[in-house]
Image (cartoon, helix red, strand yellow):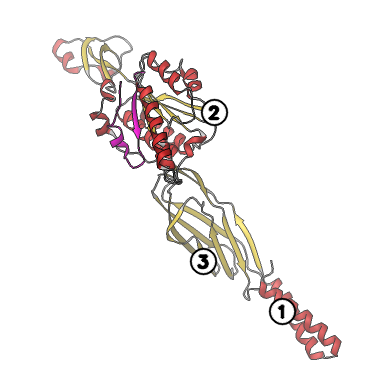
Amino acid sequence: MWTRKAAIMLTSGISLILIGMMISHFQLMIIGLTFIAFLVINGWVTGHSDLEITRNISAQNVYKGDDILVEVSVTNNSYRRTQLLEVFDNVPHEMKMRRGINQMRMNLGPGQSATMRYTVRCPLRGHYTVGPVSVRHRNAFNLFVNESKVDDRTDITVFPQVREVEEALLRSNVPKMYTGATTLKTPGQGMEFYSLREYLPGDAFRMINWKAFARTGELMVNEKTRDAVTDVFIILDTRDVARIGTVLKNPLEMGTVAAASIANYFIRRRDSVSIVTYGDRMNYLPPETGDKQYYKTLSMLAGVTSKGSMPLQAVTNAMSSRISRGSPVFIISSLEGDGTTLPAIRNLAGKGHEVIVLSPSSIDLERLVSRIPRMSYEVLKLERQNRLTAISGYGAKVIDWMPDIELSQALLQVKSA
């Protein structure tokens, strides 16, 4: 590709040749031919593009608001100098540059290397890709440019923030009926001692009680009490109305933080957690325990977007056979634009489920981006309070979550009938 400097030189050369021909001035013609010959020679002499580019990042899975250190190394594997070289690492526009810069100019000799370092912050959750690397060669006189891309991409997952909610949950009325991994007075797989019994073929040697063997002369094995866990179901509203508010403060962002924090709390207590999201369609993560389920939950929440208008009752009807008997159900929704909320919650409560509704206030979130007349705001607020009161009348525990209230504080404010 020609630069502006080369275009001006070519235009000047042709102009001098034409003017020299018109006035029979051979010196002008020679100068014009010199310009054009200089361009032709520079077109032959270009930098070599045998480059090796590698990228290293400090972490591929981070939480919302964390920083990532990126290092891009460029090595000239040819036997010629690269001439003027520009390297630009493409960074998603959702990430903010904190330190350094993702662009570097260099002139590498044979076998030489250079490293570019910069730090980006991830203010928004989601799945992102850093790359490819854009490379631009310029010749010695900056007359020609050769642009190319190195398809070196790095995937980064930004998880929603996980808040500490243990203290708030323990002080509220919500978790007192869910004790996590509960010890049953029956033998099975577990941690606590239950009884001794005679050794049977097939029993593991690690279960043998050698002290009892030394005392009685007979092989005895330890029985453990069986642990049972609670299945916790978290239903997250990702409909189009969940985008009300700012980019960083809206029902969807608040909901993902709440879902991730509640899931983290119960998984740490060795409970089994399931996540359900609904918007344009329903996504279901079956209940499991452990760190693997924790990261599955975070990955699922990192990719949700606000779209669709699926009603809550369609979700509860589809999940009725999958929600185990007596399991607690957390519903995280602004409750706006859905006339099936009351019957859906009534059906869940009627089947013996403890229903906890955590509702970000979309009315107060809308005030962050637009001005609502005071009278209209009071009317909308009253309608919302009536809706929450009606839901609590069916036996559900309702939490009215204001934008300026932390999750741990919101969980202390439970309305129950």
Query: Quick check: 146 above or below 276?
Result: below
Q: Residues within 10 Å of mark 2 (few under 14, many from 20)?
A: some
Mark 2 highlights which residue? 281
Residue 46 point in image, percent of width and height: 66, 69
Instruction: Label 1: state its secondary structure.
Output: helix
Residue 43 point in image, percent of width and height: 71, 71
Query: Quick check: 218 above or below 173?
Result: above
Residue found 15% across the figure and 10% down from its top? 216
Residue 370 point in image, percent of width and height: 46, 46
Looking at the rendered structure, the kind of residue marked 1 is Phe
* Secondary structure that dominates the magenta span: loop
Residue found 77% across the figure and 83% down from its top? 32
Instruction: Label 3: state its secondary structure.
Output: loop
Q: Is residue 139 visible?
A: yes
Q: Which residues are magenta?
A: 394-417
Instruction: Compare residues 313 and 51 and report the one nearer the observer.
Output: 313
Instruction: Compare residues 264 and 375 and report the one nearer the observer.
Output: 375
Farthest residue, direction left: 215
Give whichever of discs 1 and 2 has the lower sequence position: 1
Q: Is residue 159 visible?
A: no
The answer to whether residue 30 is left or right of residue 96 is: right
Mark 1 highlights which residue? 38
Looking at the rendered structure, the kind of residue marked 2 is Arg
Res. 112 mark: 3
Give whichever of discs 3 and 2 has the lower sequence position: 3
Res. 100 mark: none
